[in-house]
Amino acid sequence: MREIFLVALLMLALPAWAFDRSHKSWDAMLKKHVILLEGGKASQVNYQGMAKERAALTEYLHSLSRVGEQEFGAWSRGEQVAFLINAYNAYTVEKILARYPDIKSIWDFGKFFGNPFRDEFFTLLGRSMSLDGIEHGILRKRYREPRIHYAVNCASIGCPMLREEAYVAARLDEQLEEQARRFLSDRTRNRFRDGRLEVSKIFDWYKEDFEPREEYFARYAGVLGMPAGASPRLVFLDYDWALNDSRSSSPR
């Protein structure tokens, strides 16, 4: 009888809700509303379609916010990284939808007042959080994985593409590596030309994450179209902050 009583108490103590670490609902939205370009090297987002599924997005965001630090801490490294990347991307879409369709850039929210990256407009891991809080406060600081830069999407054309599926722990390394190769092979954002290696401003802004950069780029020489053993002058391209909206007629 005592054992039955203890089991009953344990059952009552267990959470009635468990987070779906396969991110199934977010995955479905991405597969439906992310449009691949240039053979998969870039993407645009059908924000109009996303807006029609606002209820599903809201529910997914609520599920993210219900995860506490203790639960999160019990997960594997891959599950934690996938969770944070998906959260960053989903909350970025939510931020855009707050003004859509009357928005041309995420910076329309403002750079000093209303800064979209510093605004703590959601709750994550039990505390008020911003997009910068996820990327710089947790992802970059805790995990030391430079390919994270190819996974988080800032809703801009110059940014590495929003992936057409959710990140999951079982395939995280494969997904991150594909994102790296997709971005580095996009000649609108990274290219070897006239003896120069012209690359995204990401490699300037987050220089320390890719050091030593010469060795990093040498590892991807073939993807960049750069001759093996080359030591080109590094040039940083302008960053296009225009919204990555599928309504855009900007040529790729």
Image (tube, rainbow, N blue to C red):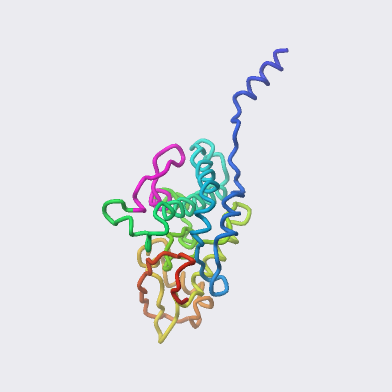
| Quadrant housing residue 38 | bottom right
Check the picture and name the quadrant holding the N terminus: top right
Q: Is residue 20 magenta?
A: no
Query: Which residue shows up at 50% across the image and 37% down it?
Result: 68
The residue sitting at 53% across, 70% down in the picture is 182
83 lies left or right of 96: right
**Closer to us: 1 or 97:** 97
From the viewer's side, name the closer residue of 251 and 142: 251
Instruction: Give coordinates of residue 206: x percent, y percent.
Output: 38, 62
Farthest residue to the top: give it. Answer: 1
Q: Percent position (x, y) of residue 134?
A: 43, 49
Assess whether residue 123 is covered by the magenta stretch. Answer: yes
Q: Which range is magenta?
A: 116-136
Choose between 154 and 94: the one closer to the eye. 94
Along the viewing direction, whichever of 156 and 194 lies nearer the viewer: 156
Residue 28, above or below 178: above
- Residue at (34% x, 59% y) in the render: 107
Q: Among all residues in the image, which is located at the extreme bottom?
A: 194
Return the x and y of residue 199 as percentages of the image width and height: 41, 74
- Residue reaching furthest to the right: 1
**Residue at far left of view:** 112
Please state the total of marks drawn on the protein image: 0
User: What percent of the width, then of the height, locates residue 204?
Assistant: 36, 67
**Above or below, 205 relative to 135:** below
